[in-house]
Amino acid sequence: MAAARSALASAGRAANEAVSFVVFMLLDALEVLLCGVYKVADYVAEGAWRPCYCSSSADAAAPGGKIVVSERGGSKVVSMLSSTKLHLEDISDTLYTRPSVLASAAASASPPSSSYPRPCGTVRASTPVTTAHSAIVQILRGKAGIRDDAEHKPYPSPRWSDCHCANCNPADADRLFVHVDGPQDGGATEEDVLFIHGFISSSGFWTETVLPHVSREARARRRLFAVDLLGFGRSPKPADSLYTLREHVEMIERSVIDRYKVGPFHIVAHSLGSILALALAVKYPAAVKSITLVAPPYFPVPKGETGTQHVLRAVAPRRVWPAIAFGASVACWYEHLGRTVSIVLCKHHRLWELAFRVFTLYRVRTYLMDGFFCHTHIASWHTLHNIICGSAGKIEQCLEVVRDQLSCGVTIYHGSDDELLPVGCSYAVQSKIPRASVKVIDGEDHVTIVVRRQKELARELEEIWDTKRT
């Protein structure tokens, strides 16, 4: 019986790989077609050719290529990065280095050779240059306020392919949407709690689940903050942002920590939010009282591998099954297909929400749909690559700082049935921070670990907050 099951499992994996190869090869072809469609559509709607990350050119100055400029004599890229307080290391190479299925198969079948063509986005180490893909330069120009190039007009915000409703385009474009529970006067509280949601979500992930079950006693002593991250929910969605780790953290600081004069605080974060939580903990080591991570996306990088590419393949393995892996693969590997999905779902999210409510006879709350639909493609695309993939090296450093320089408690929750991020991610965090406590919840997945055990998690969080640690 065991041998039969093993053979059946092997056959299933082989079938999954074969079907996946064909499906993603077809999606590669569709991506090329959509690239041309959107170039024409953008020109008609916005009056300019828009660069994208599809180009494999390593030194083309035309839109869609890769701009390479010498550091000697100063460069526009360097000045734009300086004026926008960004660095090239904030930007993940997975934005523009995503080989097709056939190219990946050919590369894996070929022995390493110095004559093998370099992947898109790489430059020889001996060349003293600063590099930036032209799609990045396009966004930097708008962020730096450069308006002197008629051929490269800044992106309008919102773009024609984005939703134009008031919720998606708040009047205050300088601060995030923040839900606040508890005393408004920070001086009347002992400490605060910051809740950070994950990818393609919103503050509703916390405010509609855990926060209502936090006890009155805990609320009396603490303010509870839940934010919509930059580009998601009811927060601003600038078209001229690269949605880097630095930008996300600075917006949380400006919108919560500085605005509400936050003192000692606890952090509770889900999925992608765990990366932001660790970055905040490193920046405020004396203020953080505890860190609670739910399904953190941490993939240790083997020696000799590029961290960003390793994480990309781990999060998005280009498989049709399980379904959540297929969705992650489409979101990570296909810029234009992802934009198509965004137009269908996000641009028309009010119609989908209404249809869902009518279909369920208004019996089902739609906060998860609100989080899933209320974002722009520019926000989701860049956040996915620059935070999850691009932070491969940064999260390693953050974990070491938390281990060596912070004394706060670290608690990690993970669902045993999580098909997006395996339980091994949490144990990998524990291997870096031995004092961390890992709690695996049987039968729960990436989302239900919170939404199906709201009362239990609220009670456990209160115990964490009340625990005195040295």
Image (cartoon, rainbow, N blue to C red):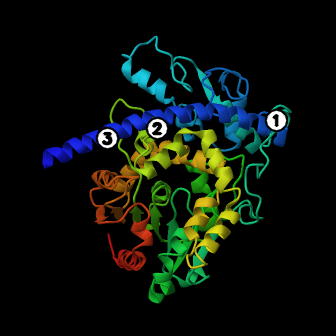
Mark 1 sits on what residue? Answer: 48
10 Å crowding of disc 2: few (<14), some (14-19), many (20+)? many
Q: Which percent across, then down, holds residue 32?
A: 63, 31
Residue 308: image tag: 2
What's under tag 2, amino acid-wise?
Thr
Q: CA distance from mark 3 to mark 1?
A: 46 Å
Give 459 or 125, whichever is nearer the viewer: 459
Q: Which percent across, then down, holds residue 470?
A: 32, 69
Name the mark nearer the viewer: 3 or 1: 3
Mark 3 sits on what residue? Answer: 13
Do the residues under discs 3 and 1 have CB atoms within 8 angstroms? no
- Mark 1, secondary structure of its residue: loop
Among numbered discs 2 and 1, the one appearing first in the sequence: 1
What's under tag 1, amino acid-wise?
Ala
In percent of the image, x 46 and y 33: which residue is there? 22
10 Å crowding of disc 1: few (<14), some (14-19), many (20+)? some
Give 407 or 124, whichever is nearer the viewer: 124
- Asked if one can make out residue 169 in the rendered structure from this viewpoint, the answer is yes
10 Å crowding of disc 3: few (<14), some (14-19), many (20+)? few
